[in-house]
Amino acid sequence: MAIYLIVALDVLNGISSLFLLCLGLAIIFGMMKIINLAHGEFIMLGAYATVISANAGVNIWIAMLVVAPLFVGLVGLVIERCLIRFLYGRLVDSMLATWGLSLLIIGIVTTIYGNTQQGVPTPLGGFSIGSYQSSYYTLFLAGMAVVMMAVVYGVMSYTRFGLIARATMQNPAMAATLGVNPARVYMSTFAVGAAITGLAGGLLAPVSGITPGMGGAYVAKAFMTVVGGGAAILSGTMSAASLFGAVNQVGAFFTTPVYGEVLVFTAAIVLIRLLPQGISGRFFKGNL
Amino acid sequence: MTIRFRLVAQAVAVLIAIIAIVLIPSVIELFAMMQLTLFAAMAVLALSLAFIWGFGGILSFGQTAFFGLGGYAYAISAINFQDSTPSILLAIIIPSLFAAILGYFIFFGRISDVYLGVITLTVTLILFNCVNSTSGDEYRIGKALLGGFNGIPAVPTFNVPFYPDQILSPEQSWWVTGGTLLGTFLLLRLLLSLPAGRVIVAVRENEVRASLLGYDPRKVKLLTFVLSGAIAGLAGALYVNWGAFVGPTIFSLSLSAEIIIWITVGGLGTLLGPIVGCVLIEYIVAYIGSQQALNSNLVLGAVLVVFVLLLPKGLVPTARDLLMRLVPAPKPKAQLADEQLTPSVAASHMAGAE
């Protein structure tokens, strides 16, 4: 019995961390059709911001929930102004430039902090079910995933900013005639996406090894989740994250973590082949 | 500049290239020649992506999947057979088969280019993860121990065909590698000037129009993909021959990124550009590696960003345009021939890209 509970917790953990990792990318890709291959490096920057401020004496919760998103959001803002704004509508060029950007960020961080692993202790202790151990932090991650989902849904559906953002993405020329400045909407959307990614990096910092190259492990997973999810930001990402997160954890439980990952990648390929528009292109059409 | 003049110029260029390849070992020292051998093997890889991306309009983020498969196929069969002749063939056949299966999935599923990027990237990661986890005695194919993260050391290098005891010397290895590079280049050049090559470019330019003219874009793309996989596999065998070693890092994302950087720097839509870009970038990376002052990721990333933003055409097309400006404007007829010989650089906007 206890073992099933533990597997269920693992699955929950897999799904919620995958959702958190992908949300920022889903916003940037879903709304602006910019493929941000530096997504993994945004996560890495968030994690570094958390670790470095926490080790400098900042409260771990503030480091995670405030410093990381603020810092990465600012970085995103600068990057949008200096690089991304020249690339809207140039899909392939945006992929290339952000890939270059990702190498550049890895290079800068390696030069400053060296190619060594950093870390912070996991807050909130653990509990045991039967003879198995788990940590409260897992539950906290799941809670954060739910909170983020609610916040994004609320902002997109019920606020003026959300309305303007959605309108600009649908038809920039029309929005511009109505007095909206599309360049500014793009800029803030990109920064918000980056900030959410930074938050994900901060939240995952205590449970992952932090190196300059850590982003590479996330970027492919995040991509296939967003692409597998399709155009709808929330429902698509959530359904794809649930599918892949569950496949990963269950696969890892029955075989090894490596084959769990292989299983996810294979599932992603089959999914894209079967549903080229992603899950939400088929089942949640027109949803957010 | 008439067509005839161009043909003569091209023949002279090929002749110079052949002479250079033959003479290089007697001019430069062994270390530099070994480095050139590596660059030439990498340049074959660059050609494989230059062909499908620049002329087929298919941006594969996982060209290293075929490169790595070729390398592993060569290493495993060379250890088992102790003869490089069938191994080189296998290094071409296995990646082609893999490309055929993967390409069937992609092109007959009519998967758009974003998804294609994701799928090729994912497949490369799968291979990396799988090969990485094969450490231990139970993972062996015949006599070859896969070795997981440590890779396969002491792979037999090329020998004279059908004479397993006559191992090629470094000079002969260079001739083989350089010759393969030149051969691949000429083969692709020839293919692109044939009607079949025109069809490939036509599909890149406009898939719907090509299919209305009676060509099946799916089949054309699949064949292009398979050919490029075969070339990448051959490059893998050449690479393993150079180092007598193959490890899972051959599948790594950073190498995939490097190929794309070579082509962006050298010039998309040309065959010469990627070779230039490859040698240039690899030289810079090797130089940085010996310096320890700057991080190679930092330099590569900066180079890629700068080229995408400021010089999106790449070095070779930019240089060619500058040269063309110096030469007096050609007659309309000659201009047509010029266009046919060097297909337009509009490749950066692939068919179907937004």
Image: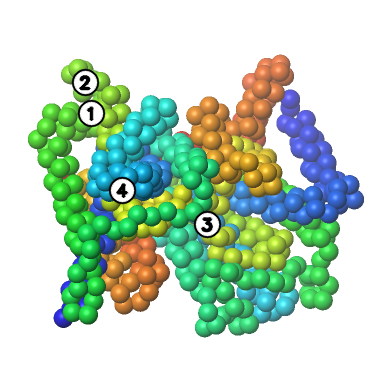
Q: Nearer the viewer, mark 3 or mark 4?
A: 4
Judging depth in this view, the residue of B343 and B297 nearest the camera is B297
Where is residue A275, by image quadrant? Answer: bottom left
Q: How far is the residue under mark 1 from the one under mark 2?
A: 8 Å
For label 1, the SS is helix
Residue type, label 3: Ser
Q: Quadrant of residue B195?
A: top right
Look at the image and tell me in which quarter the N terminus of chain B lies.
top right
x, y percent for residue B247: 59, 65
In front here: B160 or B310?
A: B310
Q: Which residue is mark 4?
A: A202
CA neighbours of label 2 inside 10 A, class few (<14), some (14 to 19), many (20+): some
Helix, strand or loop at label 4? It is helix
Q: Position of residue B97 (x, y in %)?
A: 53, 66
The crowding category of the residue bearing disc 3, from other C-alpha atoms within 10 Å (few below 14, some 14 to 19, many at least 20), is: many
- Residue at which label 3 appears: B252
**Of the residues shown, which amino acid type is indicated by label 4?**
Gly
The amino acid pointed to by label 2 is: Val
Residue A180, numbered label = 2
| Alpha-carbon span between mark 3 and mark 2 | 44 Å
Label 3 chain ID: B
Residue A196 is situated, as x and y percent measured from the top left of the image, at: 27, 42
Disc on the earlier residue, 1 or 2: 1
User: Label 1: few (<14), some or many (≥20) within 10 Å?
Assistant: many
Residue drawn at the location 44% of the way across and 39% of the way down = A98
Residue A168 badge = 1
